[in-house]
């Protein structure tokens, strides 16, 4: 009888709830703070509620990782459900303290917990999670799933359009881009996550030009017809994300492709209007 193990991703993952249920991927939620009020994203704060709250003039959202106790409680709950081991995939250490909290909690417990830094966030974490969950479904061992997660970490690309720099500035994550982008409100930055760091790629002046440039940047990296695993993500921008998703489906052989609202934690930093694409080639699963 094969070992029973859980696949857990943190709350920055851009993963549709129905897909998480289908593949039995567990979520370790993060927190969103508005002043002294703290909410748990996806539990008592939905994306809709977050965007409504963001419209208030005094809205200054921040985020925080799960506490040590919350991590420990989540892992012990999984153990009580009968899981013999846990695979936990987190946001890059450069972007959050979640990895540190998770590894500290794991070290305090006496059953197997492997923690993998995705080297990214959002759809990149989600795609590593779905790969490992499908490997489990196919009968792969815990060790094989952990090895797969480590192989994909840092190799899932993330390109995105930021509609406004305002939230990035407030969160302190725009410092590396301000020299390039300045403070022009009309600028639409295109960014990537590379080895845990947010890096600028280009800048354009309209949303339509930003979408066109995003497609060009992807085409420069991936040949037409390539077999890809893809997540198209957005923050309260489903129509533009849908445009990108249709283009991807026409241009590439998407063996896995879903569109996801990235959620309150990502939107607290990137703001509303983000459209992004995360992907890795099928060939990575064959190596």
Image (spheres, rainbow, N blue to C red):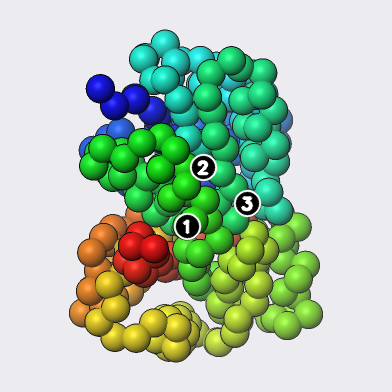
Residue at mark 1 to residue at mark 2: CA–CA distance: 11 Å
Q: Are marks 3 and 2 in contact (CB under 8 Å)?
A: no
At x 44%, y 88%, the residue is: 220
The tag earlier along the polypeptide, 1 or 2, is 2
Q: Are marks 1 and 2 in contact (CB under 8 Å)?
A: no
Foreground: 287 or 48?
287
Give residue 89's mark.
2
At x 52%, y 51%, the residue is: 150
Foreground: 43 or 248?
248
Give the image location of residue 251, x and y in percent. Answer: 25, 82
Which of the 4 quarters of the picture holds residue 39?
A: top right
Give the image location of residue 209, x and y in percent. Answer: 45, 87
Give the image location of residue 27, x and y in percent. Answer: 44, 34
Q: Can the viewer see residue 115 in this picture?
A: yes
- Mark 3 falls on what kind of element? loop
Give the image location of residue 244, x and y in percent. Answer: 33, 74
- Mark 2 falls on what kind of element? strand
- Classify mark 3: residues with Cα within 10 Å, few (<14), some (14-19) or many (20+): many
Residue under pointer 3: 92
Query: Looking at the figure, which quarter contains the N terminus?
Result: top left
- Classify mark 2: residues with Cα within 10 Å, few (<14), some (14-19) or many (20+): many
Residue at mark 1 to residue at mark 3: CA–CA distance: 13 Å
Which of the 4 quarters of the picture holds residue 37?
A: top right
């Amino acid at each position: 009888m094969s070992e029973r193990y859980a696949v857990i991703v943190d709350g920055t993952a851009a993963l549709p709830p129905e897909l998480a249920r289908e593949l039995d991927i567990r979520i370790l939620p993060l927190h969103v703070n508005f002043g002294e009020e703290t909410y748990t994203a996806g539990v008592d704060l939905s994306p809709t509620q977050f965007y409504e709250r963001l419209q208030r003039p005094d809205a200054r959202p921040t985020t925080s990782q799960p506490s040590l106790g919350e991590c420990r409680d989540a892992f012990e709950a999984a153990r009580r459900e009968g899981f013999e081991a846990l695979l936990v995939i987190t946001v890059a250490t450069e972007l959050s303290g979640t990895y540190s909290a998770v590894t500290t909690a794991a070290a305090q417990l006496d059953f197997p917990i492997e923690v993998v830094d995705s080297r990214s966030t959002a759809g990149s974490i989600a795609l590593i999670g779905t790969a490992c969950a499908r490997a489990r479904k196919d009968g792969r061992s815990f060790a094989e799933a952990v090895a797969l997660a480590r192989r994909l970490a840092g190799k899932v690309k993330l390109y995105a359009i930021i509609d406004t720099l305002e939230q990035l500035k407030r969160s302190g994550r725009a410092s590396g881009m301000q020299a390039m982008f300045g403070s022009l409100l009309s600028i639409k930055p295109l960014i990537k996550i590379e080895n845990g760091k947010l890096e600028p790629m280009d800048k354009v002046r309209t949303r339509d030009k930003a979408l066109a440039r995003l497609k060009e940047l992807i085409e420069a990296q991936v040949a037409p017809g390539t077999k890809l695993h893809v997540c198209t993500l957005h923050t309260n921008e489903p129509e533009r994300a849908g445009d990108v998703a249709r283009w991807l489906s026409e241009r590439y052989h998407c063996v896995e492709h879903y569109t996801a609202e990235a959620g309150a934690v990502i939107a607290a930093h990137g703001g509303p209007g983000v459209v992004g694409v995360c992907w890795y080639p099928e060939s990575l699963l064959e190596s």
